[in-house]
Structure formats: structure tokens, C-alpha cells
Amino acid sequence: MICDPGNPSYGTCYIQTGFYPGELPYATTVIDGESSVLVSDYLSGLFYKFAITSLNASASYACPLGPATYLGVTWNSDEDVLYWLVNDQGTRYLVTSSSGGILISQTAISVPVGVPTISGLTWNPATGNYWTNAVQNDTYLELLSDGTFTGASFSNPEASGGGAGAFGLGLTSVLDPITGEYLLDLAVGPPSAQRTSRVVRVDETGAEEGLFFPLASINSLTGYITGIAWTENGSWGGPSDFIVDLDNNLVVEVPVPNPNAPSITTFVCTADSDDNVTLQWINPITYSSISVSRDGEVIAELGPDTEFFLDEDLDSGTHIYDVKPVPASGVDLPAATCSVVVGFGRLLGSSSHAGSTAGPSTI
């Protein structure tokens, strides 16, 4: 179904579709600096650019090696170049080009023994390395820019121990704004499907992040999915996956809004006999920073891993403390609050709190 662009839900609808004017749409990536989605033909040696705002296609561009099998493409924004995964007459190459397809370099890939086919390509800006899919081995492999493999790998989430091969084509790097970590969105399917049936988000060990969506729930994605490309700046103003449907010659924008960052929910304040207060809390994730306030005034800005603060030599009376985390995304999260009695009347001395509403008074 078509999304409400003002408030789209994660992976349950589509924003827009664009018709692919070539023959066999396959590899795809987003060039954020151009606000365009690049989709390459599988064999013809041509590619097209689609405006993110409208998914209108450009005129065709020539791929860097001309007619060949183009298995993957990804934009490296640090170098301002495209990296291509190409099979040219049986030799696999990692090719670089300008955004217009002008050849810069090509490097033969040293494919690991026992890996007959690789497909898909995405760049991780955090490591500078690349990931591809050993399709027939149900495995994703990390690749360096010199065409060699690091040895890092993880299994297709749909793989089973029964011997039948899972299915997966297309992968894309995704920035998690909560943690600042780069994850992967994979288009995968079980052995019984022999095509992709869902998009699942994993980290670089293959551990699932709890975010996925079934392709069957999106009316326009009924065909054979060959490519996927993520951007944090979709046409609706937030993150989207652009998915390539080969059977129907479509490029489809699916919104994948960022989940809300969790706030601090466990926070305890304790006063001692020297009129000091110890604050202790648990960070459910790694934040960018943590702000500590006493009685409405900020008294400390702490680093991301801190879960303790000592406030010393206080005046007698009741004090209210807030700890407010700031996630990598910068979104506004509620503060955790507790109150504590310092000096006379300090017999109980502490209260704990979960959430953004003050806990019980200790007076």
C-alpha cells in the first residue's frame, strides 16, 4: 500500500515507484551528493540514475567496462567514486569509476576457494571495507579495496542446517543513528522461496537487530528482487530503502524510519554522612553524552560510557537530580529523575526512578 509520507511506518508500505527503462535492472546504490539512485543493467553495460524526489529516470550512462555482467555497485563518498563488482568474461573485477561511469581503475578479485559466485556490493564508511554475498554458500564476505578478502564473514539469516540453500541478493550499509554503528540491510529468503521474501537488518557478525519487513506486504514488490540501497534522506525526509524489482522493471522506495533511542530507566541517588550524593544509573545503549542536573541546573556533562557521578559537599535539604542522555542521533530523550535528602532527615536517603517521572520522595 502507499504510505502516508507525513508519518510512514517501518517497511509496511511504499512511498513511490519508478519504471526502469533498461533491460534487466540489477545492481543499485544511492549517490547522496546527487540525491540520486543509480540502477545498473545486468548485462547491457548501461545504467540509469533516478531522482530521489520523483524516481524519474535519466538518460542512460555507459558502465565503466562496457557490456559485461554487473553484479554490484556502491558509492564511496570519501573518495567520490563508484565501486563496481563486475564479471568480465569469467574474471571478477573490483572497478572504480566516476559517478558518470568513466573508468578509473580495475583490480582482479581473489575469490576464496570454494566460492563459485559473488553478488552485491556495499561500502562500510566506518571501516572503509566492502561486503558482498557468496550466494551459493549462504555467506556474506568482507572485501578490501585491493580485491582481497579479510576472512570476516557471516551466514545468511535464512540459512538452515538442512543443506538446502537460502536465497539472498542485494545488501546495503545502514547507519544506526542511535549507536553510530553501520549495519546491513539484506534482501533474503528461505530455501523454499528461491527468491527474496523479506529485508532483515543485521550487524557485521550477522546478528539480527530486530528490524525487518516482509516484501509481500508491499504491493509493488511482487517480483524478483535483485538490489537494495539505503539512504538517510529519502523523498519523505527520513531513511528509505530503494529496492529493485527485476520482474516488474521497478524501483520502489520503502520508508524505514529510525527507531527511537531508549532513555535511561534505572537511576538511584544515595546521600552519605559527609553531605555527598552518589548518582548511579544504567545506560541501555552507548550515548554521545550524558547531562547531569541538580535542582534544574546542569552540573556536569559526562562521556558516553559513564554510569556514576559523585556530587560533593552539598547544602542540607532535598535535592532533585536529572540525568539526560543525548544519543548519536541528537533526538530529545526524557531525563531520568530522583530525589534525595541531604543532612538532617537523611535516614532513608535515596529513591530510584524508572522513566521520565520523579520517583517517590524519601522524606
Image (cartoon, grey):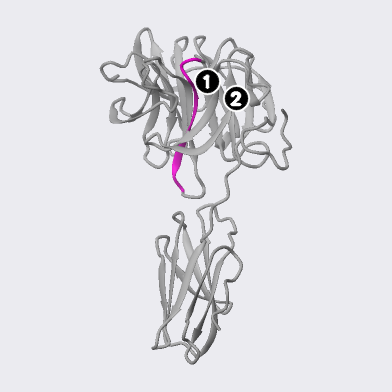
Question: Against 195, is 80 above or below?
Answer: below
Query: Magenta residues?
Result: 180-192
Q: Residue 196 carries which label?
A: 1
List x then y, in percent, for residue 259.
57, 46
Name the foreground residue: 359 vs 230.
Answer: 359
Magenta stretch, main secondary structure class = strand
List x then y, in percent, for residue 276.
42, 84
In this view of the protein, can residue 222 be seen by the observer? yes
| Residue holding disc 2 | 215
Residue drawn at x 42%, y 40% as measured from the top left: 125
Contact, mark 1 vs mark 2 (Cβ under 8 Å):
yes
Q: Is residue 255 left or right of residue 177?
A: right
In this view of the protein, can residue 102 be seen by the observer? no
Mark 1 nearby-residue class (10 Å; few <14, some 14–19, many ≥20): many
Name the foreground residue: 55 vs 95.
Answer: 55
Q: Marks 1 and 2, Cα distance to the nearest angstrom?
A: 8 Å
List x then y, in percent, for residue 198.
54, 26
Q: Which of marks 1 and 2 is nearer the N terminus?
A: 1
